[in-house]
Amino acid sequence: MNKLTDQPNSPALLAADWEGLRTFAAFIESGSFSGAARVLGVTHATVSRRLQTLEHALHGPLFTRRGDDTELTRLGETVLSAAREMQAQTAQLARRLAGEDIRMEGKLRIASTEAMATMFLAPRLPALLERWPQLDIEFSMSHQTVSLARRDADLAIRFARPQDGDLIARKLGKISYFLCGSRERVAEWRAAPGSAPFIGFDDGVPDIPETQWLADHAGGNPVRFRSTSLVTQCMAARAGVGMALLPHFLLAPELELAAPDGGATSQPQLQREAWAVYHRDLRALPRLRAVLDWLEGCFAGESPV
């Protein structure tokens, strides 16, 4: 038996290449060579080479493959635990160093949905960058929740207050959602609500309030188009594909509100809270505070309709 499995702090493990350990952790977490390559921004061949080098340095196999399943060896379990601990320590150091940076300059990465980043935040960036021209703002747009502990982002906009004690949440405001469509589709909905075509979400987000609202109020209506992207849903609604439930910042002149009385209304069908969330290690970072103030201003100055 390879004695390394019982000695997580052995010289061989401590001397292992950090890139190899990081690659191994990414491979296990993503479940494939190609997934690890995407996470790390390298090629499939680089991932394979790093894992082979790591196994050679540690004198034993880290995993076995059975079809699409990956099974860790005892050595692999030990190495994965060590790699994750090193990742956590590295991320903690990065957060602390960032939190001690007193300059009002540099990069700040914001995790947000595509719709909010593209249609709500991006048009409002000039006000932030004119005041702080040395800032470098980056948007991370994904339907997957990013890890603030690993510094996947410095700040995230989320629709629920997190329960993690290491995270600080600041309430920004509420996002109002309205049922809308082209003039023809809205007229069709008013005439025959049960048969009007709708635009919905795909199966990737079954539990969000928007999906639940559509299920409760239009569960029997035909769905002509599905997409997780609200921007895509908006474009389809503008083209007359069907009725859609959209946030106020996506309401366009081509879209008419589906008010029951046939007129405009300020009453949304749904509202969701928006929170700015960041790790407590970054709470003193000046550029984070500047972006938080800007975000609050974006929401405070927004008129839903």
Image (cartoon, rainbow, N blue to C red):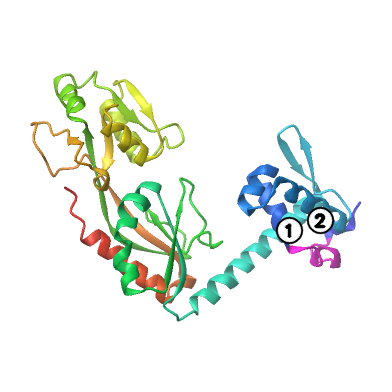
- The location of residue 26, given as percent across then percent down, is 66, 51
Q: To which residue does mark 2 refer?
A: 54
Q: To which residue does mark 1 refer?
A: 21
Give the number of the disc on residue 133. Answer: none
- The location of residue 151, given as percent across then percent down, is 53, 63
Residue 180 horizontal side relative to residue 126, left or right: left
Whether 196 is among the magenta residues is no
Determine whether 17 is above or below 227 in the image. Answer: below
SS for dot 2? helix
The stretch of residues the image draws in magenta is: 7-18
Determine whether 257 is above or below 164 in the image. Answer: above
Quarter of the image for residue 70 reads top right
Q: Residue at the location (30% across, 37% down)?
A: 234
Quarter of the image for residue 292 reads bottom left
- C-alpha gap between disc 2 and disc 1: 7 Å
Residues at marks 2 and 1 touching, judged by CB atoms closer than 8 Å: yes
Which of disc 1 and disc 2 is earlier in sequence? Answer: 1
- The amino acid at mark 1 is Leu
Q: Residue at the location (87% across, 54% down)?
A: 56
Determine whether 257 is above or below 81 in the image. Answer: above
- The location of residue 202, given as percent across then percent down, is 42, 32
Quarter of the image for residue 32 reads top right
SS for dot 1? helix
